[in-house]
Image (tube, helix red, strand yellow):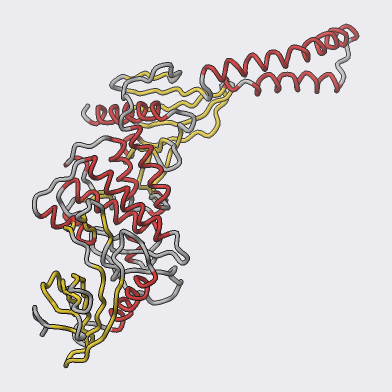
Amino acid sequence: MLSAGQTLYDRYQLQEKLGHGAGRQTWLAIDLSAKSEPVIVKLLAFGEQSQWDDLKLFERESQILRQLDHPRIPKCRDSFSIDDRILWFGLVQDYIPGTSLKQLIQDGKRFSEEEVRKIAIEILTILRDLHSLNPAVLHRDIKPSNLILGADQQIYLVDFGAVQDRASVEGATFTVVGTYGYTPIEQFGGRAVASSDLYALGATLIHLLTGASPADLPQRYLRIQWRDRVTLSPALADWIDQLSHPDLEQRFQSAIQAMDRLNLANTVSYAPVERPKNTRIQLSRSKKRLEIVIPKQTQEDESRLEILGLLAALPVLMFVAPMLLFVSIVGVLSSASWILLLGLIVFVMFISPSFQRTYVKFDRREFIVETQRFKTTSNRMTGITRDIREVRRDSNGLITITSGPYRTGYRLHQFGQELTDFEQAWVLKEIRSWLKLKSEI
């Protein structure tokens, strides 16, 4: 039985037990051969409650930590084994003075929006570096207890006991790792990818904001329901929702992509929610319907293109008009004349994008997203209003309406690529506001 004051490997004197689990213990110790510097000693008792899979994970953690050299990850100093009635395997790491985010939550700390943004950026920076290695290193167990707020006020990522440094192989056996509430569905199935760590980060941020573990929060269609518990800018809330999306395809695919979108969300969160100045979007709403008309181009672009189109068409008209007058006199319209005439019409019509519009319409029964060019409808998408689950901006900068579930899954209705950030924020606010009003009728 290990106890405080005991010296292991003739070098590491145990001071305080920091944690324990099935066959595992974590101790704060001092390194007697290095001027009594504090270190962390992780121990695995093999043969008690531990199995070969536990030993493989323990050895993998040691191997990967020895290869890593990151300022926000504690370095691996040493590893050893002791056969004292029980076979102990030990791993020695740098000690990071500070407090875990879990302990701060338990002490009553509630994190502000600014603090959560800072923490998210710091963790994403660490994940970016880990995921960019070859092979990529996946932590697979990001949660408040594994994140240390150091004495220097920087975030450190610890406990690589669930780490993976290679892609999963189809048909191979695997060990399920992670913590319930922070682990995405695909990881429980043995398929951990870079965005699996992003899900765990999203769940962690929800814990910091709400003070409640994600496992204790209600779910709807596998999505954590948390937004009614906090006051947060819609842009950041949308970003966290996408970070923690249960559908792997709807989640951010990389830490770099998530950081880019967070920086954009930071800009949009301070954008006005009133109608942006000089916007050409037409919006009308009542209790029964909401209609939005989005031009293809800005007014300045359209005016410029229309003038260019007119100037380009003028010489063609001067050439074609006399020819058409002549053939009408002789009563014969040659095939060449027809081609020139049709070419002129197509040329003038398509050089001006002002003929294209995107229409988004909602009423109590259904909603429609469609594109029209010269009053001809294309790319028409429809859905049932009561089936709408969320309206958000996705990682590609499109406003996305998610409806379902249906037998074929969820349906995505997307539009708004041509909108500015301020216009998107305004349109999102109007749609969400109308849907909430509609549900109260």
- Closest to the observer, 348 or 221: 348
Asked whether, in this view, residue 338 is left or right of residue 107, the answer is right
Asked whether, in this view, residue 277 is left or right of residue 374, the answer is left
Asked whether, in this view, residue 308 is left or right of residue 291, the answer is right
Q: Position of residue 213 (x, y in %)?
A: 17, 54
- Residue at the extreme front of the image, as rendered: 35
- Is 205 situated above or below 361? below
Q: Position of residue 419 (x, y in %)?
A: 45, 28
Q: Quadrant of the C terminus?
A: top left
Where residue 230 sits, quadrant-wise, is top left
Where residue 83 sits, quadrant-wise, is bottom left
- Residue at the extreme right of the image, as rendered: 330
Query: Which residue does the image show at 11% across and 74% down from the upper left?
Result: 15
- Is 256 situated above or below 31? above
- Is 286 situated above or below 20? above
Query: Which residue does the image show at 29% across and 80% down from the upper left?
Result: 79
Q: Position of residue 141 (x, y in %)?
A: 28, 63
Query: Which residue does the image show at 31% across and 32% down from the upper left?
Result: 269
Count of numbered labels shown in the rendering? 0
Asked whether, in this view, residue 119 is left or right of residue 173, the answer is left
Q: Quadrant of the N terminus?
A: bottom left
Query: Which residue does the image show at 34% across and 68% down from the upper left?
Result: 163
- Is 28 situated above or below 247? below
- Closest to the observer, 389 or 26: 26
Q: Position of residue 148 (x, y in %)?
A: 22, 58
